[in-house]
Each structure stands twice: as C-alpha cells, then as structure tokens.
Amino acid sequence: MELPVEAWYRAIPARTSRRSYETKLPDESLLARLARACREFRPFPEARVELVRGPAEGVFKGIIGGYGRITGAPAYVAVIGGMDSPRAQECAGYTGEGLILEATSLGLGTCWVGGFFGRDVAAEQVGLKEGESLLAISPIGTARKSLTFTDRTFKLFAGSKRRQPLAELIAGGAVPDGAVRKALGAARLAPSAYNRQPWRFRVEDGAVVVRADKADEPGKISRRLDCGIAMLHFELGARASGLAGSWEFLPPPDVARFKFRPA
C-alpha cells in the first residue's frame, strides 16, 4: 500500500485523542476501509495492526494509564510488534500511526493507549503469533459530540499548546527553512505517551536523523515507539512538500535516518 500522503497529511492537525464514544459500531463501509488498511499497510515485517469489531469493555476496563478512562468504545485496533527484531518498537509506532491517521481521515475517533489495559483479553482476540507482543491499542468509533470532563481535562494538560517549540527539538536549535521545516513541523505534532515528545532531530546534509532523548526504561511505554510515530509524520510532511526519501534504521540512541532523494 502506497502512503496516502494527501489524506494522512491533512489528518495530522485534525487528529485528537478522544476517550468517550457512542456505543454503536460505525458504518460498516468505514470499518471495511479501515480493515483493508490494516491488511495492506504493512511497511515493515516487524509490525502489524489488527481491527477488532465488537464491545471492548474487557479491554478498556478501568483507568488507562495516565490518560483517563475510555468509555463506550465499540471497536479497537491493536498494534503488534515482532519482538525478535531490535526495531520492533519504532516499526510498530510508524505502522500504528498510519492506521490512526486513516481512521481520522474517515471521521473516526482514536486514542493511543500504551499503558494499562486488558492485555490478556486483547491478546486472545487478536491472536498473537510466536514472538509477537501487543504494544498498544486504540479505541475506534464515533466520538461523542460533546467533550466529557475527562476529554476536556486531558486536552488541557496534553494539548498542542504544551508542545515544545521546534527549535528545542533540533540539535543545535537551528530550524531549517522550506520543505524540511514543514516536515519537522509535522513530526512535532506527533502524539506521544504523556505528551513527552521524546524525539530529537539532527539535520544533516541531505538527511534528517530521528533519535530518542533517553533510553527506554523496563516496563515503561517505549520512547522508540513514540519516535516511530514521529517518523511517519515527518515522512508525510516531507512528501507533501515534494521531498522524496527513505528510512535507514540506526543503533541507539539514534532511531532512523530519512535520506532525501533527488527530485
């Protein structure tokens, strides 16, 4: 599946985390399109996303990490990584965000959840293969029109106004002009656990490197997964600006390098 650059790039500023949903399943035509994207958008062998239709009470039970309660979700997507690969986390973040943006472009609500949820229930529903791990999930559905208190609270504390300035995310603090700046701006809008924005960028001659600000801590949501989300945003911004290129994975603390190709 080719990147639907125009639709997903437009979805970047439109995406917002929603935690309260109508209990009725969305129109089947929308779910069919999302399921098709799950099957076809698999840019890396280390990661896949599965759509699970049906009530998700056993998955979104109780408090979900630091992001509050998910209520009413009639379906969800599960982001799965093949943990035999050292790049599983970043591949999962990149792939999972593709499905989040696809859902957003279809008018569906989403919310990345990588902390506490019913992992055993979800793992049974998606059918994990040997060596795979369930890294994150997201509710899928029609978000309630009026924001609940929980939605308003977390929009306030994790909103875009609290994001770090772009200059603070770039090594040396110098923000480039033109298309690269646009691509970095798209990456800055990527969602991350607790809105921690763990990605940092190093602008090189003909390339941009994404790195994690800290090493992953055991038992915590992976910073490299968050960096994978930012990778997709960066690529969408680059391609929307006419910059072609490809990713080269790197050892820690770097994550990957996007090498530009001549137009």
Image (spheres, helix red, strand yellow):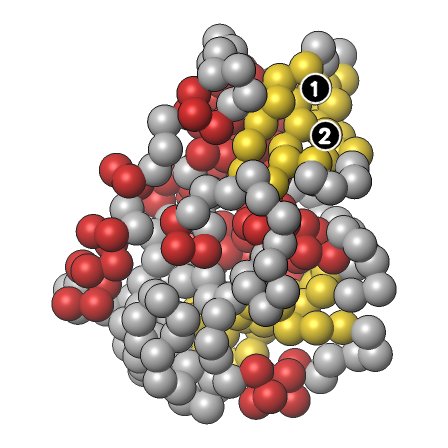
Q: In this rendering, is residue 263 above or below 53?
A: above
- Picture coordinates of residue 187, whole percent (x, y): 50, 34
Where's residue 31, x and y in %?
51, 69
Q: Position of residue 193 (x, y in %)?
A: 45, 56
Instruction: Give the residue number, with chain letter if any, for mark 2.
Output: 257
Query: Residue type at mark 2?
Result: Arg
Q: Is residue 235 left or right of residue 101?
A: right
Toward the viewer: 4 or 254? 254
Task: Judge by depth and name the residue closer to the eye, 138 or 117.
Answer: 117
Residue neighbourhood size for the residue with mark 1, other residues' Cα within 10 Å, grouped as few (<14), some (14–19), many (≥20): some
32 shown above or below 105: below
Q: Tell whether 242 sits left or right of 153.
A: right
Q: Residue at x 42, y 81 (%)?
A: 60
Q: Position of residue 161 (x, y in %)?
A: 25, 38
State which tag comes first along the sequence, 1 or 2: 1
Q: Report which residue position mark 1 lands on.
A: 207
Q: Amino acid at mark 1?
A: Ala
From where the camera sits, is residue 77 visible?
yes
Lateral position of residue 159 relative to residue 61, left or right = left
Q: Is residue 30 above or below residue 60?
A: above
Label 1 to label 2, Cα distance in Å?
A: 7 Å
Q: Quadrant of residue 48?
A: bottom right
Q: Residue at x 28, y 40 (%)?
A: 162
Q: Residue at x 34, y 66 (%)?
A: 67
SS category of the residue bearing label 2: strand
Determine whether label 1 and label 2 are within 8 Å by CB.
yes
For the point 46% across and 42% down, which residue is it?
197
For the question of whether residue 35 can be seen, the reply is no
What kind of element bears circle 1? strand
